[in-house]
Image (cartoon, rainbow, N blue to C red):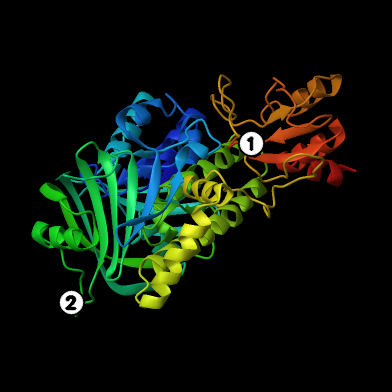
Amino acid sequence: MTISVLIVGAGPVGMTLASELARYGIPVRIVDKAPHRTDKSKAMVLWSRTLELLDRGVGGAQPFVDAGFKLEGVTFIANDRVVGRVAMDSIPSLHNYALALPQSETERLLEERLISQGISVERGVEATMIVPDDSGADAVLVHPDARKETVRADWLIGCDGAHSTVRHAMSVPFAGETLLSDWFLADVHMSGYPRSDTDASIHWHKDGVLLIFPIQPGRYRVIGDLPPTESSIPPTPTLDQVQELVDRRGPAGTRLNAPIWLSGFRINGRKVASYRQNHMFLAGDAAHIHSPAGGQGMNTGMQDAMNLGWKLALVMKGDADESLLDSYSPERSSVGDAVLKAAERLTAVATIRNPVAQQLRNLAAHFALGFTHFSRGVAEQMSEVEIHYPDSPLNGPHHGGARPGQRVPPVEGRPPVGSGTRPVFVLFGTQNSGVEHLVNRFPGLLDANIQPPLHPDTLSLVRPDGYLACSSQGIAEIEAYLGRVSGSSRIDNRAS
């Protein structure tokens, strides 16, 4: 059997990609070897940029917002004194907050979205014996009743996590290391917590770090580092052990009860060099894993999926040249590198052991967070709205205003760029006769409706994922850019 797209892995990343392709009318199968959706909270936050991109899809981000709990800031504390605070209301987004939402709920809502699109996740189905070639991949799907199905996939995407079967089939090195320090994670109920439920708090203690993250009123996630052990696997803490660490590092009088999930883990920092190999791709944890500091992992993976989705759809529909897909890996790999380095820095700063270095850290943080510009920059980095693609091979000419590769913020009351059932570019500028010519020449690439200018006397072309592609004073450069994306410029050159 030949299928158009096979997605291996039905976590948040795989389901996000499946939903993106489905709304563009691309046939897709999505399989996962686990028999059920996760019931664990795991990744706990949806950041502003992810919510903006979810707004483009079926039903928008509102179901996620309704199910979640808005956090207004992050407070840094050292020696029981507030070092500084990062406020989320400074984020230049319609979603200027962090949304606390257990991964189990994120997955439930994504699967409901898929079902509404006519897509069913095939659970308990494991992809094995994946053999790639230049034009796709052969795979054996093992069903829950042990039945084996041999399939041919024109395109195969591995969204199957850190131990990715797809990555192994691609023979791609997963370079990096596992840190030897042990960490704990506890989802618990708490009483006596003296701080606002609308703020996460990071406690820097001489013995280590403690993060308290509200999930909903009265329920919290607590994360901290532990003394190293000789164990080959990280120990799972007891509630009493977590309580002892909260008593020592956290706010006095806080009492933990009714644990929902207790777990131990070690931090891995690993990443592939390339996310693409012919007609196979990697996304999410299959391509990059890192410290949970900053809560970027799931969001970065979902944004991998949204970056790949519109590009693959345009290529499969025949509206874009396959070279468009060459931009996926450099764009998302650069983001993966930045996230990995930022998570490593945050972890290193939080776990400083030298007393003098700890004092210097606390003073420097207090000083820096006192500047609005600095704290706003931290909020924009955490929320991922500052992600852009300055070195993307898709960046075209520039004339005034934002530079190609930068995010174009959504505007309240206006449908976000990329919403709807077609992955089309959108032109911002002044209506003129040349626009109709462009729409007629590139009907599968360009939206017929021109939007208000982003910059005076400038035509700006915005990608389906809301990033600026190019800007120009005239139609000719926009036409040339779309010609390159469609592949027609190469055809024209050969013909001439």
Q: Nearer the viewer, residue 150 or 344?
A: 344
Q: Nearer the viewer, residue 235 or 324?
A: 235
Left or right of 463 on screen, residue 143: left
Sequence-wise first label, 1 or 2:
2
User: Which quadrant of the figure contains the N terminus?
Assistant: top left
Q: Nearer the viewer, residue 387 or 255?
A: 255
Q: CA distance from mark 1 to mark 2?
A: 49 Å
Q: Position of residue 320 (x, y in %)?
A: 66, 39
User: Which quadrant of the figure contains the C terminus?
Assistant: top right
**Circle on res. 231:** 2
Q: Position of residue 400 (x, y in %)?
A: 80, 40
Q: Position of residue 316 (x, y in %)?
A: 57, 38
- Number of residues whose C-alpha sits closer than 10 Å to that of mark 2, classed few (under 14), some (14–19) or many (20 or more): few
Q: Residue at x 81, y 29 (%)?
A: 456
Name the outermost residue toward the right.
Answer: 496
Tag 2 secondary structure: loop
Give amino acid for label 1.
Answer: Val
Can residue 287 be seen in this snapshot? Answer: yes
**Circle on res. 252:** none
Name the residue carrying label 1.
Answer: 408
Give amino acid for label 2.
Answer: Ser
Tag 1 secondary structure: loop
Task: Quadrant for residue 167, please give it.
Answer: bottom left
Task: Quadrant for residue 422, please give it.
Answer: top right
Q: Position of residue 226 (x, y in %)?
A: 23, 69
Q: Residue at x 15, y 63 (%)?
A: 236
Q: Residue at x 63, y 51 (%)?
A: 327
**Figure check: 469 above or below 360:** above
